[in-house]
Image: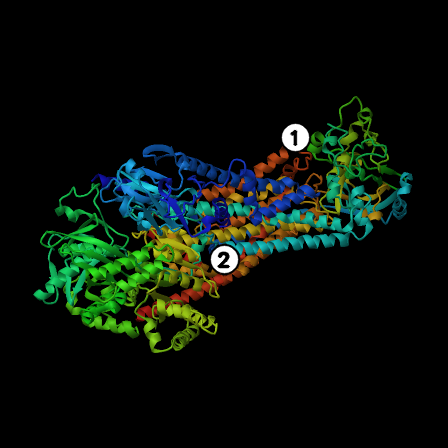
Amino acid sequence: MDCSLVRTLVHRYCAGEENCVDSRTIYVGHREPPPGAEAYIPQRHPDNRIVSSKYTFWNFIPKNLFEQFRRIANFYFLIIFLVQLIIDTPTSPVTSGLPLFFVITVTAIKQGYEDWLRHKADNAMNQCPVHFIQHGKLVRKQSRKLRVGDIVMVKEDETFPCDLIFLSSSRGDGTCHVTTASLDGESSHKTHYAVQDTKGFHTEEDIDGLHATIECEQPQPDLYKFVGRINVYSDRNDPVVRPLGSENLLLRGATLKNTEKIFGVAIYTGMETKMALNYQSKSQKRSAVEKSMNVFLIVYLCILVSKALINTVLKYVWQSEPFRDEPWYNHKTESERQRNLFLRAFTDFLAFMVLFNYIIPVSMYVTVEMQKFLGSYFITWDEDMFDEDTGEGPLVNTSDLNEELGQVEYVFTDKTGTLTENNMEFKECCIEGHVYVPHAVCNGQVLPDASGIDMIDSSPGAGAREREELFFRALCLCHTIQVKDDDDVDGPRKSPDSGKSCVYISSSPDEVALVEGIQRLGFTYLRLKENYMEILNRENGVERFELLEILSFDSVRRRMSVIVRSATGEIYLFCKGADSSIFPRVIEGKVDQIRSRVERNAVEGLRTLCVAYKRLIPEEYEGVCTLLQAAKVALQDREKKLAEAYEQIEKDLILLGATAVEDRNLKQWSRILQKPLPITGEIANHVLSRTRKEGLLSRHRSVTRLRLQEKAADTIEALQKAGIKVWVLTGDKMETAAATCYACKLFRRNTQLLELTTKKIEEQSLHDVLFELSKTVLRHSGSLTRDNFSGLSADMQDHGLIIDGAALSLIMKPREDGSCGNYRELFLEICRNCSAVLCCRMAPLQKAQIVKLIKLSKEHPITLAIGDGANDVSMILEAHVGIGVIGKEGRQAARNSDYAIPKFKHLKKMLLVHGHLYYIRISELVQYFFYKNVCFIFPQFLYQFFCGFSQQTLYDTAYLTLYNISFTSLPILLYSLMEQHVSIDTLRRDPSLYRDIAKNALLRWRVFIYWTFLGVFDALVFFFGAYFMFENTTVTSNGQIFGNWTFGTLVFTVMVFTVTLKLALDTHYWTWINHFVIWGSLLFYVVFSLLWGGIIWPFLSYQRMYFVFIQMLSSGPAWLVIILLITVSLLPDVLKKVLCRQLWPSATEKVQTENQCLSVEQSTVFMLSQTSSSLSF
Amino acid sequence: MTKMKKTSQICQSKLPDNTALKQQQLPAYRLQLSATGVLSGFFATGAFCLGVGIILILSAKSIKEIEIKYTKICANCAELREDAINFDKECTCSIPFYLSETMQGNVYLYYKLYGFYQNLYRYILSRSNSQLVGTDLKDVGNCAPFSKSHNGTPIAPCGAIANSIFNDTIILSYNLNSSIHMEVPMLRSGITWWTDKYVKFRNPSAINLSSAFTGTAKPPYWSKPVYELDLEDTENNGFLNDDFIVWMRTAAFPTFKKLYRRLNRVQYFIEGLPAGNYSFNITYNFPVTRFKGEKSVVLSTLTWSGGSSLFLGLAYTVTGAVTWLAAFSMMAIHLMLKEKRTLFIERFETERDRA
């Protein structure tokens, strides 16, 4: 973040002051504008060099080290290391320097390698040849030498070298196709349009003669937004001003397709291209586990400091008697005697810190990182989450949040494309009250026997015939679909009859469904050619309409319009949009009939759109044109001005009819409908009346209605059983959304629905509604606590809340007196007691708002947002975990998410299996790491009481260094990758197990304290067991005596075995890898110790470990002590586990026991079934 | 057609491998701490611990040990040593004692120090390994403050450990009767680790020891130079002196004992130490009252399980007992719960039958 800020500042500084303004002026081909038009201000822009690398050869080491030591943990270890270097400490600097060096080096190598790759890619990109136009000739230059204002030629299948304004193309109509696969992952072809006035320039000479300036906004990262205008100067006339939008902009990184070559002028280069601006990393999300880990770290840091303090104080108390301070056998050196008391105390304190610093191990960070990184591969490898239809598997964009998947409390899901398959199907249309149903179709393919129109109501009269055709034409024209035919490069090579085979591409699947549906009703949209839309009418005649304007769709207006001129010269405006945005602007038409039809369809879960038109007389059109032009060329607030213009234009419409598009079906729907539903208010009426009228329609349609994504209902049910609250956020109508919610079992038959909608708020005040609802909810929850607390039993009544966007914004809006929290709290209270919430009519930003509201509520629940469209990106970024569905609406959501999955159903395995396992694994990892280091360091602390607080270490340097690096590191790492405390199948079958780990259950204080005390207990056992042994006994049978290093080695041996065996007892899933690693590291310890003590190591100045380990093992009593101490330290934990399991078993433990019984039973049954065998029981 | 093929190929390449590892389906043994398993484990552990404990206690019973603290007994010597000025005044002290039972087998003679911190950080550090292996006598790097004598010659052996060597002489004599006092034959060999004596400690190579140590000074607290530690056995001098090597292995705790001599089982003492009157004749050199410590001599026999302490045996016995206790209470709980469960199931089944 701050880097980019600095960068922009530097750029601004370099570019001079004139660049600080909001727009920039570009002189095409570096030609000065004709005198008098405008002052020529030469501007400086960065060259086209892309620098994605972080380091250069020279600054790599300092910069990388700086970056690494910015991490608190690394910094802490560095400080410890420096202290060890500076002052005389008991442990050698190697013990903490080596691990730190290892960690830093590995990270640096990894980052250096990544940066080297980036350098290579940058160089390749910066040096690739680009064709320029210079003085009418084509010149090849390296890409990095490109400057703003240069005219560039790009050939087919080349990528654009910088952001270009599209001047002309080899295609006659001035269009070109591009794919933006490397930018946003969308591989579909998109059409871009050349500037009207320059599309005729086809040769280098022509282009060179172009005299124009471009004004556009300063670079900004939004890929889909661009405003600018071009002034084209010709010799005679005034300059022509044209608006430029994102359809004229060719982005760096996109690839030219199906077009021989294009010319463009560079406007943003190098680091100012939209692609480069999008490099900026997203904000880092941190998991709850990481947060509690940090808290534990602070606790341990406090323990460390207090240990050091206690020892320092005790040391000086103990030394207050001179015979202890300086006994005759241990004189001080001169320098020691002269040192100031406080300085001495301070160095002592530091020395104790160093001595105990291993309690916070370096290796924990490495292990956690490795666990997360390697662990995330299990998600991508998972076959069950691979979707064979699309050939897509899950993607892991960050591995930091693996365990957060096991902690989700709220799921916010988008409806369309996520819950329902984004597979639209035209269902019916209603023209002035007459309903038309095309015959059953399957994925866009007309079944052979179905070709006609099935009209349900009586045939329309002859007068309505005209209206009907107008309606079909409206649908054929009012869209932004592109036609893609594979072989087609340049225009009409195919006969018009083959139009049916062409493929429609659009960002909105509704549009495709509509145009395909209309095709089945007789009108086929052929193509857009040279600004003429061609449609094939029922008589197979081609009609051509000149496309004058497109008033494009946006989610605020919820409608779009086109203005076309027919062959006869009449000008029409066709408008299509949501009923709520069309009806208020209609002045004519059979509104009531259509409205009732629309509502009926909405209840069935169909997506409805209304179509209206108006005829414009040429004068009116002139007015419209100027209005639009003014808005379009505005550089500031263009959006706002455009919206105002649209508002003025789209009014006084004549309603034509409505369409219904189906969002994929589900069988249960009809079953739900035929039973009375205990729902209140508006929806109930709709649904019930709908049920009564069922007879008419059921003849014509199959019983299935809503088509949900496969297993969506199953998934939602599982999530709810797992104690996760599911919220559906959608922009749809309330009725449609509610129907979907019933279909996907978000609301069940016994769910009591609460409504918080605009309609209700209009009747009562928001205050009253909220209080009433909270009363209903709380009364119920009160009785709930008195009854059993068995979770979601089948008979229990639960609540579902429906809220719409308007009501939500009322709640969110701070009141005049400033007490905004009041309603919010009340609303949250209601939500907390509802098992399911449906938010409809939501704007994209509102989705993020509501996620934020829940996220910041006082329990700080973990939220997950899942969606597939661009409108879900904001909520995906906002939630703790963002999941993108790799869907049809492009890849924006997947790109911005933390994890991407092909289908909604995969969420179940993602959370219930992977999330659960990751959480179990990492929480054990964290706790175990602290435990084993308490075991490690606490004896050291105790030893200070026996060595006059002189900072004598208990263990040898090698042991101090290797304990965390090699003796005990691999078993826990492999455990944290492989452990399955319950089998994957069980986890999937029994979602309620997820509740066992909710609310960070395994990292609560209670558990943490238990582990810490277990560590302390074990440490006491090791230390005092060995102490009494040494104090009272001759440990050998030949009378020889052991020294302090043998004592340390004995404690260390017991510790390594205990700590490893403790993990072995915790491991439920013993694969050969676990066996290998656990027994292997014990063996490694023994072999290492034998070697370490078996040789006089020439590089060591001391040989204190020489034969210590071997001597220890040659003594019988030492063996006995080792066995005894291991047993004693493991027994309490086993006992505690067994007792807890017997007396207060958790659901997980019950399942574990059951499974065991089951397997025993099964084997018994198996054995019994083999009656012939002569087994005796 | 070709397109179809292509896409299917892409699918295949993208489809994750179906290996057991990647699908987390490796064949594995599921370890569950079931009641029966744990119970039997507990009973077995308990039985083992009890067994070992009893054996240990029994074997420890057979061990004889005598410890005599002689700081107070030799109070006049102790007082003399309070002041460092009297270092060259000899002081001996005789401590008679009566051995009521024969000490069978090998008998070991230890000295034991109380309150002597051999494990102080600076103390442990204060030695020179390269000097002790005989490679470089002049290397006194870590030995401060006992690295060089006043005139600057390096001390050999340097350092605080060597300097503070235990220098009392303890002679055990057997009083067969009031007139015949016989010195009990003791072995000085075999009291060190073999590796210490033959690998870790080496004398500098020279024709004779005294010339090898020329150019070095004796440690300040020593009365004799290092090559004259044992006047009877020339092999037992220099860094290879057994007492020196024993002392150089620093003890883990402030109270420690070190092996001093082994009984040479000859003549009267073939069986061990016969019962009777003995006395320790001690040349008292080592000052302990200055750090409020104490000294004692220990005579002990050993078995396979080491010395006479009951600690190990008791610890095993207690562990075994506690384990059994835990196992029994666990069994009780288990049976209780099982009864409840079967009752519940029976009730459930009867109700179901009724229905």
Query: At which x and y percent is residue A466?
Result: 11, 62
Instruction: Name the residue tied to disc 1.
Output: A1098
Residue A76 placement, left or right of B261: left
Figure label count: 2
Write down the chain letter for disc 2: A
Left or right of A976? Residue A496 is left
Above or below: residue A72 compared with residue A105? below
Near-viewer residue (A229 or B281): A229
Q: Which mark is residue A1002?
A: 2
Q: Name the foreground residue: B68 vs B235.
A: B235
Q: Does residue A552 show up?
A: no
- Numbered label attached to residue A630: none
- Please state the horizontal and vertical placement of residue A411, each as a whole percent of the image: 39, 60
Amino acid marked by disc 1:
Pro
How would you rate the neighbour count of disc 2 (Cα within 10 Å): few for under 14, some for 14-19, many for 20 or more?
some
Q: Does A1064 appear above or below A726?
A: above
Query: Residue A137, image x and y in percent?
Result: 32, 33
Q: Earlier in the sequence, mark 2 or mark 1?
A: 2
Farthest top residue in view: B207
Nearer to us in this view, B193 or A678: A678
Q: Is residue A243 left or right of residue A618?
A: right
Q: Is residue A411 visible?
A: yes
